[in-house]
Amino acid sequence: QVQLVESGGGLMQTGGSLRLSCAASGLAFTDYAMDWFRQAPGQQRELVASISSYHHTWLEDSVKGRFTISRDNAHTTVYLQMNNLKPEDTAVYYCAAENPGPPVRYEYWGRGTQVTVSS
């Protein structure tokens, strides 16, 4: 059974930092790119960061310079380091395992972790 379990969310003031973790089990971890999505209230879920099995990374423009995605293949865990947090970063953050295909398929999802940034 595949599980993706996020942790590390919480309440933080503007300018603070949080580190999200996503522990994966039950899948061939290095076969997947790993992604972080977020969904704010009333908004669509959006892709924030992605990392391939070869550690090639992609970041959405609004988080470049503030967020870093990394992965530990030996421990089947992906991280999202979030610095200089802003109120607009408030959202539920989801981890996803991406089969690069083509076509790209987000095959597995975690349940999410809440990040709230106060002004």
Image (spheres, rainbow, N blue to C red):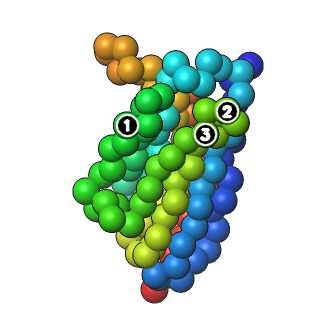
Residue 114, above or below 30: below
Of the two numbered discs 1 and 2 on the same chain, state the one appearing first in sequence: 1
Distance CA(mark 3)–CA(mark 1) = 13 Å
Q: What element carries label 1?
A: loop
Residue 104, x across and y down, in percent: 35, 21
Task: Give residue 101's quadrant in the image.
Answer: top left
Q: Name the residue under label 1.
A: 56
Q: Are marks 3 and 2 in contact (CB under 8 Å)?
A: yes
Please report the residue visible at 52 percent of the width from the left and 60 percent of the height from the top.
81
Q: Mark 2 points at which residue?
A: 74
Distance CA(mark 3)–CA(mark 2) = 5 Å
Residue 94, x across and y down, in percent: 54, 45
Q: As shown in the figure, which amino acid type bears the numbered disc 3?
A: Asp
Distance CA(mark 1)–CA(mark 2) = 17 Å
Q: What element carries label 3?
A: strand
Residue 110, x across and y down, in percent: 61, 38
Please report the residue visible at 66 percent of the width from the left and 59 percent of the height from the top.
8
Q: As shown in the figure, which amino acid type bears the numbered disc 1?
A: His
Q: Residue 29 carries which label?
A: none
Q: Name the residue under label 3.
A: 72
Residue 86, above or below 77: below
Extreme residue in the left direction: 61
Of the two numbered discs 3 and 1 on the same chain, state the one appearing first in sequence: 1
